[in-house]
Amino acid sequence: MTSAPPPDPVVPLDGVDRWAELALDELTDLPGVSRVGVAVVEGGGRRLLFTASDRQRGDTHEWCHLDAFATAPLNDAIASGGLVADALSGLDARYPDFVAAQRDTPHVALAVVPLAAEVPAMGGLVLYYSCPQPFDGSQRDDLRQTGVRLEQALRTALQPSGTPPRALSRPAPGTLVAEHDMPPDPSAVGEARRFLRSTLDGWSIAPGTTDQAVLCLSELATNALIHTGGGCHVRVELHDGVLTTRVHDNGGTVEPRVRAADDSLHGNGHGLRLVDALVDSWGRETHAHSAAVWFALAVG
């Protein structure tokens, strides 16, 4: 009987592996820390790219994918942008399966630090402690500052010097990609809608999903033009059953507000509340002189 071939290794984007190595080395030196994990959001927010300090390390780290929708401290910290820090006994009511998995380990406390300049976060840090922790105000502030610093380092790692923001998300093998430039003219939104509809028709996307994507693109493109006064770049990717659309602006003078718990992403909010209701996930990526808002839809 022929055994099945081993699965292909999970390979992160350029720069992520080196960033993880530096982050893991730094965090494992913190007092009381017995294990560290790092996670980066992938697949339009549907999964996490994860590695840890106790995984095999050769020329590269051993990475895996985690379900971003599972009930776990890491997922909650990334989704909310808030720190999760407590003794394992204090987390048992909220995360019984996670805590049960730690019973044969030396871990007694946990801190999950979101890589969050905005919500949802672009990833998270997981610190396991082998001795009780106070998690007082000072320690929590230090952890949050570490998260901010390592989030900035990750963004730098993902964007080499001189590379435009649109090159951040290098497509994985088998990804369908289409791109469209929009001039700084409100009438260009209609052309962007036609571009997206034509692209998705060519990729045999269901009409209903196409209508949702075109409506959402219209809202994001309009907001980008209003807030920046400059042109935009639209990038559409289809990979592993997920359709991801990004609108990269070219920088501007008005800073969109990130959505709070009872607020919208930015702008007047009405159109973006519609986007939030229609898509499976969305987010905002900031770069040195520009920003990108993206949304993802499952297509099968």
Image (cartoon, helix red, strand yellow):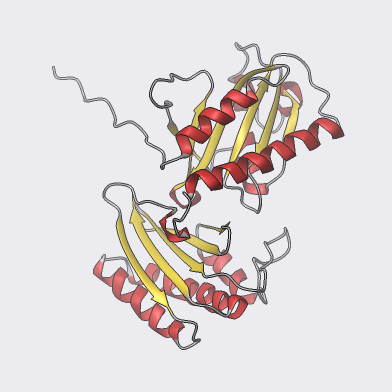
Q: Residue at x 50, y 43 (%)?
A: 157
Asked if residue 165 is positioned above or below residue 269 in the image, the reply reads above
Q: Position of residue 108 (x, y in %)?
A: 71, 17
Regarding residue 164, the answer to whether it shows in the image is: yes
Q: Position of residue 196 (x, y in %)?
A: 36, 73
Asked if residue 242 is positioned above or below residue 235 in the image, the reply reads above
Q: Position of residue 48 (x, y in %)?
A: 49, 40
Q: Residue furthest left?
A: 1
Q: Residue at x 66, y 69 (%)?
A: 266
Q: Residue at x 19, y 20 (%)?
A: 3
Regarding residue 37, the answer to whether it shows in the image is: no
- Residue 93 vs residue 259, the one in the foreground: 259
Asked if residue 26 is positioned above or below residue 213 in the image, the reply reads above
Q: Position of residue 269 (x, y in %)?
A: 66, 73
Q: Quadrant of the N terminus?
A: top left
Q: Residue furthest bottom?
A: 187
Q: Residue furthest front?
A: 162
- Residue 10 vs residue 290, the one in the foreground: 290
Q: Quadrant of the C terminus?
A: bottom left
- Horizontal side, residue 240 vs residue 94: left or right: left
Q: Residue at x 52, y 25 (%)?
A: 52
- Horizontal side, residue 6 vs residue 287: left or right: left
Asked if residue 287 is positioned above or below residue 116 in the image, the reply reads below
Residue 63 figure quarter: top left
- Residue 118 vs residue 95, the one in the foreground: 118
- Horizontal side, residue 153 vs residue 148: left or right: left
